[in-house]
Amino acid sequence: MFNVVRRVLPAVAAGIAVCLCVFSAEAQERFYKGKQIRLIIGYGSGGGYDSYARLISKHIGRHIPGNPTIVPQNMPGAGSNLAANHIFNVAPKDGTVFGTFARALPLAGILDPANPQIKFKPDQFTWIGSSSSYKNDAYILLVRAELPVKTVEDIRGPDARQMIMTATNAGSTSYDVPVQLLEVLGLKLKIIHGYPDGAAMSLAIERKEADGRMIGLSAIQATQPDWLGPKGFMRPLLQFGRRTRHDLIKDIPMARELASGKEDLALIEMLEMPFFLARPYAAPPGVPKDRAAILMKAFMATHKDKDYLADAKKQKMDVSPIDGDDIQSMLSRMTDISPEVIARYKQISDRTKLAEAGAASE
């Protein structure tokens, strides 16, 4: 009798497990069927984050049980802090909202948790994944090609020509990276920040209100394809966020190649961390685990979808996705950054803020 029970129990347990899985799948399909999922975009329309998010919104619904409608919603403000804070604190926690915001915000939340603008804890988001790990991308410093600046050496040192650069706000890579490189590499830059999004920054450059900006190569290819090339409107001077030079701009040096010592290199490597989760997506904390798993699975499946890949190729987007677990692992590495590197980062940031405050009061 005991042997019979021992043989039967595994089969019964397996049957129960199958039933539970079927029930769970049916329950999730019932939950999402006929619903809308809001995909919040932390920037205005026309920029890189917006382009990536709208492409995902076009395809991800097919990979979610019940095939809900995905509604993209732009929520620009404070360098996408507004969107990140909304997702973390206000958005429903039922799996019907997720969104994207600046890649640098998770690191900013770790480095400066007391910042009153940062009203979230990076490790408590329900991380869905990132469309790009920058495998085929690069963050580049561009200036208008008509300017008498041919290489990065033309803007290094106290006697160099000063370039006016656009940026969104502190906490974004468009601001933090050039501010830090200004001191670490001795770049002669003046950072004008407060632009709401990439489209506004690009417009300012086209109007010649500014000399240049830092932007992802894939974002340029997607939104301003006429900016690069032998007769392009802009000239690249420096690439960032990579361990090796990008194949398309092999003659352009990387920031880490210009570092003068281990301390400079350590700071640059810290600043490059966010680029390996370059297009992050997160839902609020506390989303039920089964729905979080569905969103993560759908996110990764979308990046293998032949129709998505065809559209991404047309827009020349980097498709090198990582999932939410990978992002959590990267956040763990960010918390292990040495106190000395963090202290230097804060010193540079604080000096910049003081200088900006002094200039504003004059």
Image: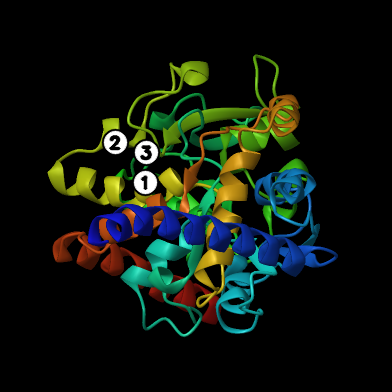
Pick out the residue farthest to the front.
1
Tell me the element at label 1: helix
Mark 1 surroundings within 10 Å by alpha-carbon count, few (fewer than 14), some (14 through 19), many (20 or more): many
* Amino acid type assigned to the residue bearing label 1 in the image: Glu
Quadrant of the rendered image containing residue 39? bottom right
Residue closest to the eye, 295 or 158: 295
Q: Position of residue 9 (x, y in %)?
A: 36, 59
The residue at the point 62 percent across, 43 percent down is 211
The residue at the point 28 percent across, 30 percent down is 257
Residue 272 badge: 1
The residue at the point 54 percent across, 65 percent down is 290
Q: Nearer the viewer, mark 1 or mark 2?
A: 1
Residue picked out by circle 3: 156
* Amino acid type assigned to the residue bearing label 2 in the image: Arg
Marks 3,1: beta carbons within 8 A: no
Residue closest to the eye, 234 or 103: 103
Residue picked out by circle 2: 256
Mark 2 surroundings within 10 Å by alpha-carbon count, few (fewer than 14), some (14 through 19), many (20 or more): many
Q: Nearer the viewer, mark 2 or mark 3?
A: 2
Tell me the element at label 2: helix
Mark 3 surroundings within 10 Å by alpha-carbon count, few (fewer than 14), some (14 through 19), many (20 or more): some
Marks 1,2: beta carbons within 8 A: yes
